[in-house]
Image (spheres, rainbow, N blue to C red):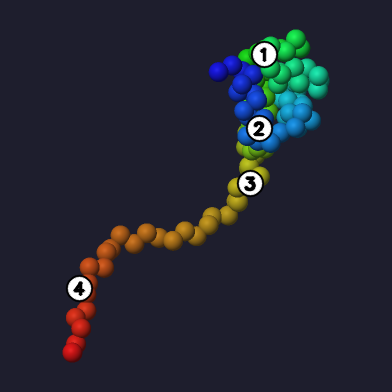
Amino acid sequence: MTNNDIFKKLRVAHKLRDTDIIEILALVDFRVTKSELSAFFRREDHPNYVECGDQILRNFLNGLIIHLRGPMPKKGEQPKGNPTTKTNKKKFNNKKNFNKPKSKKD
């Protein structure tokens, strides 16, 4: 499987348009034009087909992580999605209730 195939499958799986991919690549400071991008998604026998290099795919994957999760917090900074207060969790009761079934009285 080539980088172009992986790029195409990720595009379809995440329902991304060309403008979305350009914005994702911009998150990691990688600039690409719409025409350069469309060359990656062409068939191999097309005259304008361009092979997707490792650098482009790597930058797209890094940008996709930022797009989906958000940017990494700086050292010492609290992540935005995590609450600062403790949550009360139910305690696990390890004791089992092995009572015998009740007998029916006639």
Q: Earlier in the sequence, mark 3 or mark 2?
A: 2
Task: Give the residue type at disc 1.
Answer: Glu
> What residue sits right under mark 3 in the picture?
81
Residue 29 lies, with reference to residue 104, above or below; the image says: above
Q: Are marks 4 and 3 in contact (CB under 8 Å)?
A: no
Separation (CA) of disc 4 from disc 2: 57 Å
Question: SS class of the residue under badge 2?
Answer: helix
> What residue sits right under mark 2 in the picture?
12
Question: SS class of the residue under badge 3?
Answer: loop
Q: Where is residue 93 in the image (x, y as percent from the top left)?
A: 34, 62
The residue sitting at the front extreme is: 45
Question: SS class of the residue under badge 1?
Answer: loop
Q: Is residue 17 toward the left or the right of residue 85 in the image?
A: right
Residue located at (67% from left, 30% from top): 11
Q: Do the residues labelled 4 and 2 touch (CB within 8 Å)?
A: no
Instruction: Give the numbered dot on residue 100.
Output: 4
Q: Which of marks 4 and 2 is nearer the N terminus?
A: 2
Task: Give the residue type at disc 2.
Answer: Val
Instruction: Give the numbered dot on residue 44.
Output: 1
Task: Give the residue type at disc 3.
Answer: Gly
